[in-house]
């Protein structure tokens, strides 16, 4: 008779990608959504990447066509 174990065990590795605020990037850079870089982070939650507070754009993508003075 074969004795069965109560659990089947396996090892799984999980990778998390954590997106963090870069203070050297430039808070006034403009995203394709039209809002600034800083608006994509929450200063009350340790600068957590929460997406744009004004339009729901979650990923900051710089507008390379934006002309700043």
Image: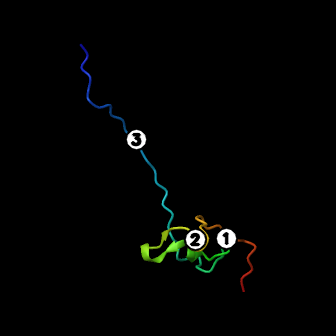
Which residue: 24% across, 20% down? 3
Residue 37 appears at what percent x and percent y? 59, 75
Quarter assignment of residue 44: bottom left
- Kindly give the residue lying farthest to the top in the view shown: 1
Mark 1 or mark 3: name the one nearer the start of the chain.
3
Residue beneath label 2, please?
52
Residue 19, numbered circle: none
Residue 35 appears at what percent x and percent y? 64, 76
Mark 2 or mark 1: name the one nearer the start of the chain.
1
Rendered position, 10 above or below 19: above
Residue 15 appears at what percent x and percent y? 46, 50
Which residue: 60% across, 64% down? 59
Residue beneath label 3, please?
12
Residue 33, numbered circle: 1
Which residue: 65% across, 67% down? 61
Q: Which quarter of the image is occupied by the N terminus?
A: top left
User: Around disc 1, counting alpha carbons within 10 Å, would you say few (fewer than 14), some (14 to 19), or many (20 or more)?
Assistant: some
The residues tagged by marks 3 and 2 sit, at their Cα atoms, a distance apart of 34 Å
What secondary structure is marked by label 1?
A: loop
Rendered position, 69 above or below 29: below
Residue 68 appears at what percent x and percent y? 71, 82
Which residue: 52% across, 76% down? 23
């Amino acid at each position: 008779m074969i004795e069965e174990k109560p659990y089947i065990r396996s090892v799984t590795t999980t990778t998390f990608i954590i997106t963090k605020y870069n203070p050297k990037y430039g808070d006034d850079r403009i995203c394709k959504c039209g809002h600034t870089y800083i608006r994509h982070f929450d200063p009350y939650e340790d600068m957590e990447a929460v997406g744009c507070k004004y339009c729901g754009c979650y990923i900051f993508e710089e507008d390379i066509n934006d002309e700043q003075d």
